[in-house]
Amino acid sequence: MIPLLLKSLPMVYHISPEMIQLLLKVKGYQSLILITDSIRAKHMEDGEYELGGQTVHLQSGVATLVDGTLVGSILKMNEAIKNMIHFTDIALHEAIHMATVNPAKKIGQFHCIGSIDRGKEADLVILNRELNVIDTFCKGERM
């Protein structure tokens, strides 16, 4: 097994690690789906952006309205996987299962997405040992 090098993790603003641990304990990784709740400001620098006609302030990884209300996240899926591993000590394959297999099954599309198999769409994300994205393929084509 290759050890993961999780040097930096994003801050958590929407849910506590303890609640994630409890949810995993109660439901198990095969029943949970990782989502990001990301808004368009994901991958953007600190600044002001628009979301549904409202001004969003992005500062230090937190997206808020003028009054300070959280409006979503800028979490990337690979960071969600890192968080699950860090917060719960689950195995890498279990966290990836929550981000790939479970959502594909939930929407009834596991026959064509969600895993690597003959006849599937070949949507792949290549991660390094630190779980950072180094390459992406959509339907077998490099993006």
Image (tube, rainbow, N blue to C red):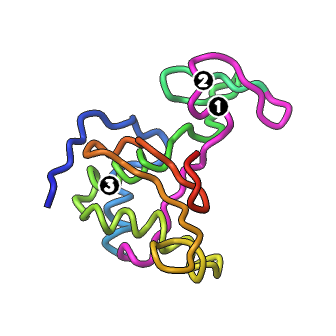
Q: Which residue is mark 1?
A: 41
Which dot marks residue 107?
A: none
Q: Is residue 57 magenta?
A: no
With 112 as the anchor, is 29 left or right in this view?
left
Could you say where residue 70 lies in the image, as x and y percent from the top left? Answer: 61, 36
Observer-side mark, 3 or 2, equals 2
Q: Which residues are magenta?
A: 27-54
The answer for how far apart the CA atoms under marks 3 and 1 are is: 27 Å
Return the disc, 1 or 2, that comes first in the chain's sequence: 1
Q: Secondary structure at mark 2?
A: strand
Q: Which residue is mark 3?
A: 18
Could you say where residue 79 lies in the image, as x and y percent from the top left? Answer: 41, 45
**Residue placed furthest toward the right:** 53
Counting other residues with Cα less than 10 Å from the Cα at mark 3, is it few (<14), some (14-19), or many (20 or more)? few
The amino acid sitting under disc 3 is: Glu
The amino acid sitting under disc 1 is: Ala
| Quarter placement of the C terminus | top right
Tag 1 and tag 2, C-beta contact below 8 Å: yes
- Residue 83, above or below 117: above
Q: Is residue 29 magenta?
A: yes
- Residue 53, above or below 120: above
Which dot marks residue 58?
A: 2
Could you say where residue 93 lies in the image, as x and y percent from the top left? Answer: 31, 67
Q: Looking at the image, which is closer to me, 1 or 55?
A: 1
Return the disc, 3 or 2, that comes first in the chain's sequence: 3
Q: Looking at the image, which is closer to me, 66 or 85?
A: 85
The amino acid sitting under disc 2 is: Leu
Counting other residues with Cα less than 10 Å from the Cα at mark 1, is it few (<14), some (14-19), or many (20 or more)? many
Q: Secondary structure at mark 3?
A: helix
Residue at 38% x, 53% y is: 81
Q: Main secondary structure of the magenta part?
A: loop
The answer for how far apart the CA atoms under marks 3 and 2 are is: 26 Å
